[in-house]
Image: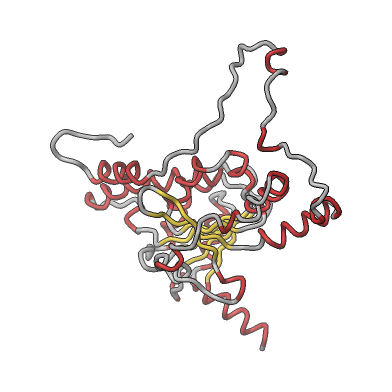
Amino acid sequence: MARMKQGIFSWEDVLAQRYQSNKPTALARSRRYSTLQSPRAQQQQKPDPRTEWAFQRDSALLAKLSPELRMAIWELVAGGMRIHIVQRANRQLGHVVCPAQTGGCCEICRGGLPSAKSRTKPTTRLLALALTCKQIYTESIYTLYTLNTFEFSNTWSLTYLRPTIPAVFWDAIRAVELRWAFPGHWLPSKDPVKTIYFSAGRQQWVETCRAVTHMRGLQTFTLELDCNWFCEPVEKLPVFLEPLRELHLRQQWTLQLPRQPYYVQEVGNIGRELRERGIECCVWAVAAAAAAATESVG
């Protein structure tokens, strides 16, 4: 709940109130049986009807193809996408399938907002395959979460998504990209004015990092710092990334720095400093990557 005061409101109060007022309604949880029930009563619980279906003998797809072939089809249809999670009006979350995989680029990739055309697309299109029938839903629904990359251009959107989907689907997500113009005043400062902004925005960032570090199925994570706001000295980067210290993946997560010569020149120093502080990430810069590619081609 937002912490409210009588009379004067601090920036922290305003930010907390905005966070709560824009928060989507949580998904209704299924009724849980009491732990005080006897084992016999628990055995008599009815199975979930959503996972039961009648065998469809007349369906050539479901009756004749092997499960392995069907899974290959589901993966081709529902996997390999980059899905932008965006905030809609009336406390709703939406998604935009990025055309980057087909050589295109959308307005969100360029740092903008979803266009009116993308907002009018039916939200069920992504679930069209899963909604065909119960059997296809059971076989294909996890593909949406395990084989796609979820991109967030706002830290609130990431924490908003968690309570709106079943926990098993949240834990199935493997790839996350967080790209945002992080305000520089989120870093500690001796300036009393900046200190107020720091305490207000820092909690939002910490909660986002906590959500990422608790994703059980996460395998790849990319944090892109946009140059529109983030222009702090490299010495402050470890302080900013401290909440991600507990993020341990099989492969190091990626930190993409702003497209500025200053950060490009400091890539090596930043990576070394972060490793010394126990933050396991691979530091990257777009300009540096382009230069390396040019040298390799030459």
- The chosen color scheme is secondary structure
The x, y position of residue 23, in whole percent, is 38, 44
The x, y position of residue 126, in whole percent, is 58, 57
Q: Residue furthest left?
A: 7
In the image, 85 versus 275, the foreground residue is 85
Note whether 211 is above or below 293 in the view shown: above
* Residue drawn at x 45%, y 59% as measured from the top left: 153
Q: Residue furthest front?
A: 58
* Residue drawn at x 61%, y 44% as measured from the top left: 169
266 on left or right of 247: left
Badge count: 0
Note whether 265 is above or below 159 in the view shown: below
The x, y position of residue 151, in whole percent, is 52, 59
162 on left or right of 111: right
The x, y position of residue 127, in whole percent, is 60, 54
Q: Point out the image quarter for the C terminus.
A: bottom right
* Residue drawn at x 62%, y 40% as measured from the top left: 168
In the image, 29 versus 220, the foreground residue is 29
* Residue drawn at x 47%, y 55% as measured from the top left: 94
55 on left or right of 242: right
102 on left or right of 162: right
When asked about the image quadrant of residue 20, the answer is: top left
In the image, 160 versus 5, the foreground residue is 160
In the image, 10 versus 186, the foreground residue is 10
Q: Point out the image quarter for the N terminus.
A: top left
